[in-house]
């Protein structure tokens, strides 16, 4: 046996074709970081006399699952590294069983809208990543000439806004901009993701100044469900589509969008593939786990755009996720500094809109999902397989399969913990989840077969092994 082999064995390994975890042994080549064999049954160290003790990983009764692919993360470096950075962001991800993050094109300065800017971002990320990192590019007015070169340089797809993004250097696009962008991407297999909120009459929807800016209801009223529905209808009906360009809705919050998506998907599935237009949809941990009804007064850490909505809305999102109308779940980790989050004033209206989640997603979804009959298999499908496919990484990420990257997570589904500031690994420890008791703990995270996080000792003695994809 070559000296670079590492064995992972356990009584509960979640393999792609099994609804439940099964006893299995996974052999990994550490030099390539790939899975080279999978055999049925758990083994003991005695079966491998030539293997060093540290190269036999016994998961026991814990579950081995594939590392999560978080396809919506704002790492903000360079330019707003005080908000988040590659080092802290990817450490937080690894602590939550995420082994790949796909970085959004905005909130860093410069944004990822040109080849030069992509190179600046890649240089900033170098030697700082605890997970693998891939990049989305951005579509802004006038940058259509950069789109095809960005695909050739490795971006996994694009993101654009139909409403102001919150940062000046990433302006939103209109229908004409999108026609140009889609034209520029003609024949290039890629994905165009939309921040799907559209304010058709920007001034009339601003709530009156007399309303209390520290009340969550004031904010909720300012971003009604109709913004999401109007954006969705524009995307589905008016933005040109092509068989090579998939459209994707990021962070769906409004349940009233769901019937339109369901109908559209059903209609498209009946068409021949050469004229079919594909739409995929993501929602976020916070829309599935939090509700507006219980958000306390003056707590801007709950602010994100689109907003967290009612209990009834949340139930409909779960229903759509379980029936496949919503394809995947991501974090949309979008932090900032306390000053901009208006933590002292509790001013939700003027606070930065973005929720910090990295490190908690798996436990959040598991805890809330347990109340709704969700199985680990479902979570792996939403957070590993679908997100890997969305980011064009399905050939190497998202499944425990021979030939795939050995990104493995040892998961204790029963252990509970309470979210504390001290345990958060992202940079600005502002979280709506503080104090929440969650079930399920990531015991160890391996990237390409190498340990990158361990419950209890964290990152002690470990080093960042992430690659830029
Ligand atoms: Zn985002």
Image: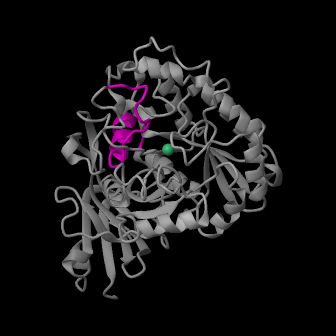
Residue drawn 42% across the image and 36% down it = 352
Q: In which quarter of the image is residue 36?
A: bottom left
Residue 264 inside the magenta-drawn segment:
no
Name the quarter where the N terminus is drawn: bottom left
* Relative side of 255 to 215, left or right: right
Q: What residue sits 61% from the left and 57% below the top? A: 157
> Magenta stretch containing residue 374, yes or no?
yes
Where does the image place residue 249, in percent across and percent down from the top left?
A: 61, 42
Q: Can residue 397 be seen in this view?
A: no
In the shown orientation, is residue 2 left or right of residue 420? right
Residue 308, compared with residue 119, is above or below; it is above
| Occupied quadrant, residue 228 | top right
Q: Which residue lies furthest to the bottom in this view?
A: 2
Q: Where is residue 60 in the image (x, y as percent from the top left)?
A: 24, 60
The secondary structure that dominates the magenta segment is loop
Q: Give the range drawn in magenta.
A: 346-375
Asked if residue 15 is positioned above or below residue 55 in the image, the reply reads above
- Judge by depth and name the residue closer to the eye, 444 or 120: 120
């Amino acid at each position: 046996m070559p000296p670079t082999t590492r064995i992972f064995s356990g009584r509960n390994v979640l393999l792609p074709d099994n609804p439940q975890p099964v006893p299995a042994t996974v052999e990994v080549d550490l030099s390539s970081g790939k899975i080279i064999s999978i055999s049925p049954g758990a083994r003991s160290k005695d079966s491998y006399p030539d293997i060093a003790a540290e190269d036999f990983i016994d998961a026991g009764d814990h579950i081995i699952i594939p590392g999560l692919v978080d396809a919506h993360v704002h790492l903000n470096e360079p330019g707003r590294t005080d908000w988040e950075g590659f080092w802290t962001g990817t450490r937080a991800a690894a602590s939550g069983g995420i082994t790949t993050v796909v970085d959004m094109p905005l909130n860093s300065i410069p944004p990822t809208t040109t080849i030069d800017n992509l190179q600046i971002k890649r240089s900033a990320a170098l030697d700082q990543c605890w997970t693998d990192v891939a990049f989305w590019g951005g579509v802004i007015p006038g940058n259509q000439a950069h789109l095809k070169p960005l695909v050739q340089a490795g971006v996994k797809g694009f993101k654009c806004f139909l409403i102001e993004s919150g940062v000046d250097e990433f302006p939103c696009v209109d229908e004409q901009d999108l026609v140009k962008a889609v034209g520029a991407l003609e024949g290039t297999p890629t994905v165009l993701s939309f921040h799907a909120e559209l304010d058709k009459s920007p001034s009339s929807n601003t709530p009156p100044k007399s309303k209390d800016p520290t009340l969550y209801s004031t904010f909720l009223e300012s971003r009604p469900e109709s913004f999401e529905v109007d954006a969705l209808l524009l995307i589905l009906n008016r933005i040109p589509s092509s068989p090579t360009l998939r459209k994707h809705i990021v962070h769906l919050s409004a349940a009233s969008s769901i019937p339109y998506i369901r109908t559209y998907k059903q209609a498209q599935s009946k068409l021949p593939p050469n004229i079919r237009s594909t739409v995929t949809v993501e929602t976020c941990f916070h829309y599935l786990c939090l509700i507006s009804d219980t958000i306390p007064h003056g707590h801007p850490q709950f602010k994100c755009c689109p907003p967290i909505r009612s209990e009834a809305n949340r139930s409909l999102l779960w229903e759509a996720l379980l029936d496949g109308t919503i394809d995947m779940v991501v974090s949309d980790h979008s932090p900032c500094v306390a000053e901009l989050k208006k933590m002292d004033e509790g001013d939700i209206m003027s606070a930065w809109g973005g929720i910090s989640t990295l490190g908690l997603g798996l436990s959040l979804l598991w805890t809330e999902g347990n109340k709704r009959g969700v199985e680990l298999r479902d979570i792996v499908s939403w957070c590993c397989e679908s997100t890997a496919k969305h980011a064009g990484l399905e050939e190497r990420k998202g499944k425990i399969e021979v030939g795939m990257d050995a990104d493995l997570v040892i998961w204790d589904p029963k252990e509970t913990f309470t979210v504390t500031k001290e345990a958060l690994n992202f940079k600005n420890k502002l979280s709506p989840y503080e104090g929440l008791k969650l079930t399920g703990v990531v015991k160890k995270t391996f990237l390409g077969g190498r340990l990158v996080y361990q419950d209890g000792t964290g990152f002690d003695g470990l080093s960042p092994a992430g690659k830029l994809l």
